[in-house]
Image (cartoon, rainbow, N blue to C red):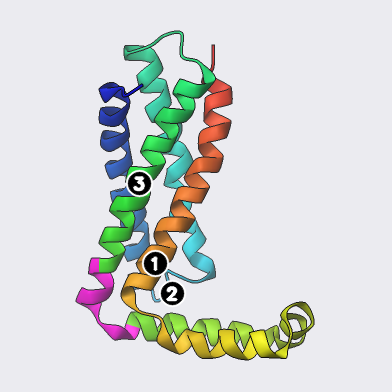
């Protein structure tokens, strides 16, 4: 049930991927773009690359007859460690840089809500729209890092399914 090789491959490739994703965040920030807004989706590009590399490495050196479930376990391990390391680095980044990166993100989200106000009210209702708009003022660095963790692990899980199907025996 517990395979240390899967964990070792997951840690190795996941931490490297998390670091590369964080470098993308830094590049976006220093180029003057909000790394947590719409352009922040670029930081997810390394995830499928590292997932395929990790499963290929595992198949090549550990289990040449890898099945779907074992490939999925390798992919999910890489996704978890990617999300964990990237979220921790994002959390530290927000604290080091200061509240201006957080305030920039909040202002961009408020502007986006204002642009799509009519559609949001039709979809959610006036009360939910107002509550969501007010909730933007209470975003903390830990909330932003947790959101980054959830998004990365979700993206990684989707690509893990694809990679596991691709590499199965």
In the figure, 79 relative to 71: above or below?
Answer: below
- Other residues around mark 3 within 10 Å, as few (<14) / some (14–19) / many (≥20): many
Q: In the image, residue 98 lies at what x, y percent?
A: 25, 82
Which residue ends up furthest to the top in the rendered image? 65
Residue 6 position by quadrant: top left
Give yes or no for contact between labels 2 and 1 (Cβ–Cβ under 8 Å).
Answer: yes
Overall secondary structure of the magenta stretch? helix
Disc 2: which residue: 34
* SS label for mark 1: helix
Which residue ends up furthest to the right in the rendered image? 122
The residue at 32%/75% (across/down) is: 141
Region rendered in magenta? 92-100
Disc 3: which residue: 82
From mark 2 to mark 3, how far is it between C-alphas? 21 Å
In the figure, 84 relative to 119: above or below?
Answer: above
Disc 1: which residue: 28
Q: In the image, residue 41 lies at what x, y percent?
A: 51, 60
From mark 2 to mark 1, how far is it between C-alphas? 7 Å
The residue at 26%/35% (across/down) is: 12
Left or right position of 97 against 82:
left
* SS label for mark 2: loop
- Other residues around mark 2 within 10 Å, as few (<14) / some (14–19) / many (≥20): some
Nearest to viewer (mark 3 / mark 1): 3
């Amino acid at each position: 049930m517990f395979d240390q090789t899967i964990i070792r491959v997951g840690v190795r490739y996941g931490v490297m991927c998390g670091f590369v994703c964080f470098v993308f965040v830094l590049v976006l920030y220093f180029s003057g773009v909000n790394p947590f807004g719409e352009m922040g989706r670029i930081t997810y590009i390394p995830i499928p690359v590292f997932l395929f590399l990790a499963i290929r490495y595992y198949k090549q050196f550990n289990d040449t007859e890898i099945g779907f479930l074992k490939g999925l376990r390798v992919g999910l391990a890489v996704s978890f460690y990617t999300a964990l390391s990237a979220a921790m680095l994002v959390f530290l980044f927000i604290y080091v840089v200061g509240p201006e990166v957080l305030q920039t993100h909040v202002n961009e989200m408020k502007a986006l809500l204002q642009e799509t106000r009519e559609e949001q009210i039709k979809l959610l209702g006036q009360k939910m729209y107002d509550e969501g708009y007010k909730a933007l003022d209470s975003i903390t660095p830990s909330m932003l890092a947790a959101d980054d963790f959830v998004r990365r692990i979700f993206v990684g899980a989707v690509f893990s399914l694809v990679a596991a199907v691709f590499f199965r025996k």
